[in-house]
Image (tube, coloured by chain):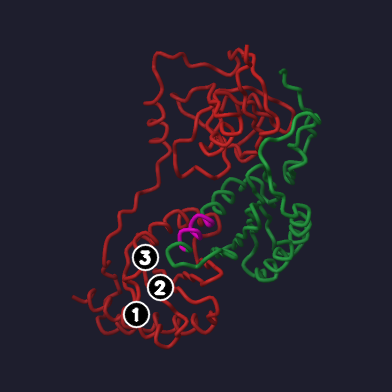
Chain colours: A red, B green
Amino acid sequence: MYNEAYSTALQNALTEIKNICPDVRTSFLFDKEGSIIAGDNGTQEYDLEKTVNSMEGIFEKAETIGGLDALIVNGHYGKVHISCVNDMYLALVTSEKADMTYVQTVSRVLIPTVIKLLDSITSTPFKPAPQKPLPLTPPFPKREQEEEMGEEIDEEEEMASPERLEPPEKESLPDTSSQLIVDTLSGLLVRGDTVEIDPKILDEWSQTYDDVEIRDVEIESFNGNSTQCRVKPIKDSKLEGKGLIRIPEKVCQALEVRKGELVRVSPLIEEEE
Amino acid sequence: MPKPKSKLEKIDRENIEITLEDIKPKEPGIQPTRKVKEPSQSAIHTALNEIKTKEGVIGYILRNTRSASIDLNDPTKIIDYAVLSSSAMDTGDELSQTFNLGEIKHILVEGRNAKLLAVTIGENNIAIFMDKNVDHNQIYKTLNRTA
């Protein structure tokens, strides 16, 4: 009952912020688990679930800089300002001309005050009742990735090591080379002769050369070492578009590269007879 | 056609700089079939080098469809920073679409230890990492001069 009261009180507070600051188009509160706690009367026209879901990745990745404190997206027609307030996140969507100092001052005073007031009335710490639990998927464990990858491998195929690879007669296409960041592939079931690249890059290469399927690539490290490998697209959608190349550890050793370093990657096509 | 073995110079790993010049074909007969826009690349590099000298700036990642240029004080964090900048841009796009923000001018991700300013100029995605006390508006202005 109290949780409902909290949500209603916060909803009213957010609506008041919108009334005080006409530049605020809409505002809502959500938590790190993806639950929307409260929203003002203008939230109905937006897909908040999708929005909060899209924040999942940034919460995780922002640990690199000590966890997410605030996120500001400044567009030509408006701004989104998401900031941490009392273990929750307050999202304010404003017009492009909004005075963010004023808006933030109002919201950063009003929301904590309402929470404090409600806490003092109920004398129990505020545990917000989520309006809707969102189906946030947990981070993909590395072990699962390896197992999933293992299932795709044909067990009859011999596990080839990079040393045993016979470099086929291939034509290299130096003008399509890309610089990619090395990420290592490890695990018992990882093929030692196959690297993984963003499917978008493979498509671009393929389109550039009349839809030829790119099956092999040449990888060059900046210390002059190079090797040829089979290539397949990265299957983990979370790693797509990051400019990564996932290289088996043995190949990394052969190239003398480590995770995080850059390598130059060129597609190889079969020479026409 | 046999592939000419390219000779790559040794590069200081703590200050990796790759430009489009590095990946251009050396033989005059071979030209890239894809057209690549190069919106004032040198101006962007000049601005980034200027920004990097500012106190409190941790480094930057400049990436377009064909090359990447990374200069970070701590090279062991390249992957983490690259993934964070990419994630920030994805989130920015999502928020922009949902709330009709139009073209994104910049994205700022503030952490408890540092912050990230992400800007797109042409087809260049630029991410600048800095301490929390650095004036990101000044950095944005410096970058915006190149646009």
Considering depth in this image, is A182 or B86 the residue closer to the camera?
Answer: B86
Around disc 2, counting alpha carbons within 10 Å, would you say few (fewer than 14), some (14 to 19), or many (20 or more)?
Answer: some
Residue matched to label 3: A31
Q: Disc 3 vs disc 2: which is toward the camera?
A: 3
In which quadrant of the rendered image does the N terminus of chain A lie? bottom left
**Residue A45 position in % (x across, y down):** 34, 70
Q: Which of disc 3 and disc 1 is earlier in sequence?
A: 3
Q: Disc 1 vs disc 3: which is toward the camera?
A: 3
Outermost residue to the front: A210
Displayed quadrant of residue B57: bottom right
Around disc 3, counting alpha carbons within 10 Å, would you say few (fewer than 14), some (14 to 19), or many (20 or more)?
Answer: some
**Residue A5 position in % (x across, y down):** 23, 79
Task: Kindly indicate whether the residues beneath marks 1 and 3 are on one polypeptide chain.
Answer: yes
Q: Main secondary structure of the magenta part?
A: helix
Q: Residue at x 79, y 35 (%)?
A: B10
Q: Residue at x 76, y 33 (%)?
A: B25
In this rendering, position of residue B75 left or right of residue A91:
right
Residue B135: in magenta span: no
Residue matched to label 1: A115
Amino acid type, label 1 = Ile
- Mark 3 element type: loop
- Mark 2 element type: loop
- Mark 1 element type: helix
Residue matched to label 2: A86
Q: Residue at x 38, y 36 (%)?
A: A144
Q: How many marks?
A: 3
In which quadrant of the rendered image does the C terminus of chain A lie? top right
**Residue A35 position in % (x across, y down):** 32, 63
Magenta range: B88-95
